[in-house]
Structures are given as C-alpha cells and as structure tokens.
C-alpha cells in the first residue's frame, strides 16, 4: 500500500512544527538511540484511527534567503506536488495576513483538497476568532491549539475524509523494490544503468502511484525488480527542488516504498552527515540495507589494506548498520557489478525470513543458558515464550514477566544470537517485549 501524504503549509511561527510533532508523536525507534543520527523532522509517519499516513512539514524545507513570499510560494508548490491533502495553517491570534492570502490563492488553484487549520485557539472563548477565516474561501476553518493539543481530532477526521482510495502498489509481491540513496554524483543513475545491463528486460516505464515518481522495472534471471523513484535522481528544475532538504524528502519517500535500500557511497569522497541521516531513516523504517561503495576504480591508494580501512571507516560511521553487507564496486568499469543483484536477492530473502516457533524457542532457551537473563532489584527477567509476528523486517515478540527488565544490552545479546543462528544479514530485526506470565 502507498500511504497517503499530508503536507502542512503556513507562514513561519503559525505552529506547523508543533502540530507536526503532535501528529507524528514519539515514534518507537527500533533501537532507542541511533548514535550520531539527529532526527530531521520534515517527514514522518502519522496515524489516526487506524489509518497510517505520511506527514511533511514544508516549513522544515528552507529555501535559501529568499523573501517570505517566495518561500511561501515554494512551500505551497512543494505541498501541491508531493501530497494528497494539504493542511493550510494560519495563526488565529493574528488574523489573515497578506502572505496567507497569497498562499491561499496558489493552493486554491491546485485542486488538491485543503483543510484550513486555525492554530493558537487555546480556549473556547477564542472560537469567535474563527469566523474571519471563512473569507479565505477554503470552507470551514478548524480551530486548533498545538500547544494544548485541542481540536486535532476533528482536524484529522476532516483530513482523513479526503484521503484517496488506498492504491495498491502496482507490483507483484515477489518483486524486489529497490531504492538508491546517496548524495548527488555518487553514481546512483550509473548504478541503475549498470544493473539494467545490456540484456535488460524493461517491462515499461510505470509512472508510480505517488505523484511524478517514475519507477524502473526490470527482470534478471527470473526475478522481477523495480528501482523506485528513478525520476528523483534526475536533474530537477524548481527552486525548492535544488534544496538539500528536498532531496532528503524524496529519498525518504522512496525508502518508504522499497524493500531493499542501497546506501551508495563514493570511494573518493567518504561519508557525510546526510548519508548517515538517510541511512538511519532506512534502518528505522525496517528496510533491508546494503552499503555500496561505488567508484572503486577511481580510489587512489589501493593496496590490500585500503578496502579493509575503508570498511572500518564505514563501520565506525554507521554504528547502527552492523548487519548491512558492504560491496565495493564500479558502475563505470563494471568491476564486481555481478555481485550486486545476487546480494540484493540475499538481503531481500533475509528480510522476509520466517523462523518456525519451536526452532526459535529452542534457540532462545539455549541462549539464556549461555548468558542468564539480567536481574534488577532482586527480580530476574524471565522469558516465557518467543514468537515471530512479522516479516519485512523479521519481528519477534518476547513474552516476559517484566518488560522493563529487558535491558538494551540483553536485547542486543539476543539479537546477536538470532543473527548467529539464522540468516539475517542485511536486515534489521525488531524485538518487542510484552508482559505475559
Ligand atoms: P512553525 O514555524 O510554523 O513551525 O511554528 P512552531 O511550531 O515553531 O511554533 C511557533 C511558536 O508558536 C512557538 O513558540 C510555539 O510554542 C507557539 N505555538 C504553537 N502552537 C501554539 C498554540 O496552539 N497556541 C499558542 N499560544 N502558541 C503556540
Ligand atoms: P548520481 O547523481 O548519484 O545519479 O550520479 P551519476 O550516476 O550521474 O554519476 C555521477 C558521475 O560519476 C558521472 O560523471 C559518472 O560518469 C561518474 N561515475 C559513476 N559511477 C562511476 C564509477 O564507478 N567510477 C567512476 N570513476 N566514475 C563514476
């Protein structure tokens, strides 16, 4: 399923990020703290009454030092392009401003469903201020208070009512959906071309289900693949499209739709913060991950140690990706290119691994014998039963006496045992502790 996308547009300081954080809530990370990754809150998951969707805070995408109106226009355009429903947010304490009117005009022309949110309506008496906003011509204004958490339910009901009918991904479930992430010029497009190869079988250029995403399907050795959002890799036009945050946004959207994420690095230039951020997102989203070091042909001091050194550097930088295999190759000379798709197949297979319950429980009981469960204040963690509840990524629920006793270090030990026993290379693993005696 592709999840609907909601964008929040509005002047600075009307409360967009406050609302964004409220909608997104505190997401449970697979590992609580990913070292070295600061969260970039422009794009995240929301959920309302069992419906999942994506939220974009367009205010998080700064467009250089442009004047307010130019910024606002760019944000409105971005919302129109990237979302299914737009929340247009204004400040109930300030009334309608010129900038609000300009943005309203733009949004109005787009034919996208727009929900007008009047923020900072912190109490019932302030409801009267809402009437003025009818004149924006966007229908009923929804009074909300980000700081007090008021009115959000009604607002989200309205937003949800505009969601398009759920669109199924147009691909067979066996198709491996690949997203390539990495900053410009690392060689993503070259890698796609090299994967397609001479004997490629391009089925067709399917315009993706998300606006203007262009996917590239192909097959090799009876396996179907699709490279998600190939269009996002091409040179783009609009002002906002050249901003770094926008390319991050595109990458995150592509990750969302994929099974396997190729984190593409460049042998010549090393690793930058943005690589880590995006890879951290792929990890949190529970995708299979493969680290590809491209342009190995151009790497200067190549001796028997250089690959090991580079690998160590990657391991030091991506501490949370210990499970991701690293492949050094060259899209240009095709050196080691032949290993790429087999490795993609492998991590995709591991991502959907199912472990029979009895095998799982036997293995965990052995692990507990090897390394007894932790105790806290005289109480010992007792694992009663383990079961796998999902694949993509493999997700295990541990039924225990006291979930708080499952310390991070013990959980890591269990994960390591799982990895040592089963084929889980390239996939994150989720471990959930539930109370059950
Ligand atoms: P953004 O620039 O649109 O993302 O706005 P922020 O979310 O950063 O909020 C701007 C300021 O408005 C902050 O100081 C918030 O604490 C404040 N704010 C946000 N929502 C409300 C609200 O519902 N009521 C009041 N009184 N202040 C709010
Ligand atoms: P993208 O922006 O990540 O899609 O990168 P491109 O695929 O457009 O490649 C950027 C530049 O790097 C182009 O000039 C490519 O020819 C070059 N390039 C790509 N792969 C390799 C490689 O393996 N080795 C070398 N030496 N150059 C490469």
Image (cartoon, grey):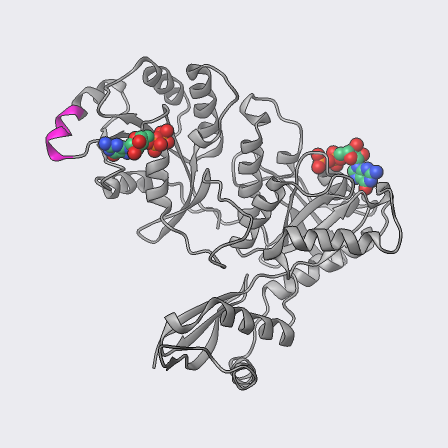
Q: Quadrant of residue 421?
A: bottom right
- Magenta run includes residue 125: yes
Q: For residue 241, what is the image quadrant? A: top right
Q: Position of residue 27 (x, y in %)?
A: 41, 52
Q: Is residue 324 magenta?
A: no
Q: Outermost residue, right direction?
A: 303
**Which residue is at the front of the view, 198 or 68?**
68
23 sits to left or right of 96: right
Residue nearest the viewer, comparing 370 with 193? 370
Q: Residue 214: image x %, image y %?
A: 61, 37
Tell me if residue 12 comes above or below residue 358 in the rendering: above
From the viewer's side, name the closer residue of 426 and 354.
426
Residue drawn at x 64%, y 64% is 349
The quadrant in which residue 44 appears is: top left
Residue ID at (36%, 21%)? 108
Magenta range is: 123-129
User: Residue 386: x and y, percent?
Assistant: 46, 78
> What residue appears at the point 67 percent right and 31 percent down from the top-left corner?
234
Task: Please identify the dominant SS of the magenta region.
Answer: helix
Q: Is residue 436 visible?
A: yes
Q: Residue at x 81, y 46 (%)?
A: 197
Residue 222 is at least partly visible in this image: no
Q: Position of residue 5 (x, y in %)?
A: 43, 40
């Amino acid at each position: 399923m592709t999840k609907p996308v909601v964008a929040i547009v509005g002047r600075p300081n009307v409360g967009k990020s406050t609302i964004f954080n409220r909608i997104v809530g505190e997401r449970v990370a697979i590992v609580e703290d990913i070292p070295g990754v600061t969260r970039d809150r422009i794009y995240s998951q929301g959920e309302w009454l069992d419906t999942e969707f994506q939220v974009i805070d367009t205010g998080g995408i700064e467009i250089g030092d442009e004047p307010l109106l130019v910024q606002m226009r760019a944000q409105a355009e971005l919302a129109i392009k990237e979302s299914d429903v737009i929340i247009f947010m204004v400040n109930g304490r300030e009334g309608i401003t010129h900038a609000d009117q300009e943005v309203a005009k733009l949004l109005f022309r787009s034919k996208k469903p727009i929900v007008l949110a009047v923020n900072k309506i912190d109490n019932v008496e302030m409801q009267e201020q809402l009437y003025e906003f009818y004149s924006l011509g966007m229908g009923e204004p929804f009074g909300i208070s980000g700081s007090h958490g008021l009115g959000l339910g009604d607002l989200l009901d309205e937003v949800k009512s505009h969601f398009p009918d759920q669109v199924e991904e147009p691909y067979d479930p066996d198709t491996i959906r690949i997203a390539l992430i990495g900053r410009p010029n690392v060689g993503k497009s070259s890698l796609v071309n090299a994967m397609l190869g001479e004997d490629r079988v391009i089925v067709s250029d399917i315009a993706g289900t998300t606006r203007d995403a262009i996917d590239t399907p192909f097959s090799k050795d009876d396996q179907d693949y699709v490279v998600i959002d190939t269009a996002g890799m091409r040179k783009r036009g609009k002002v906002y499209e050249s901003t770094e945050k926008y390319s991050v946004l595109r990458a995150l959207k592509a990750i969302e739709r994929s099974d396997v994420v190729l984190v593409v690095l460049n042998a010549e230039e090393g690793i930058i913060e943005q690589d880590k951020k995006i890879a951290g997102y792929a990890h949190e989203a529970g995708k299979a991950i493969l680290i590809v070091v491209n342009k190995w042909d151009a790497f200067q001091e190549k001796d028997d140690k250089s690959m090991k050194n580079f690998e160590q550097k990657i391991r030091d930088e991506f501490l949370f990706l210990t499970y991701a295999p690293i492949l050094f190759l060259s899209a240009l000379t095709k050196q080691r290119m032949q290993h790429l798709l087999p490795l993609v197949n492998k991590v995709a297979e591991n991502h959907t691994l199912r472990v029979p319950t009895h095998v799982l429980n036997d293995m965990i009981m052995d692990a507990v014998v090897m390394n007894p469960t932790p105790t806290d204040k005289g109480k010992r963690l007792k694992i009663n039963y383990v079961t796998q509840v999902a694949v993509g990524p493999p997700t295990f629920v541990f039924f225990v006496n006291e979930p708080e006793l499952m310390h991070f270090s013990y959980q890591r030990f269990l994960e390591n045992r799982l990895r040592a026993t089963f084929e889980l290379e390239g996939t994150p693993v989720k471990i959930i502790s539930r109370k059950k005696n």
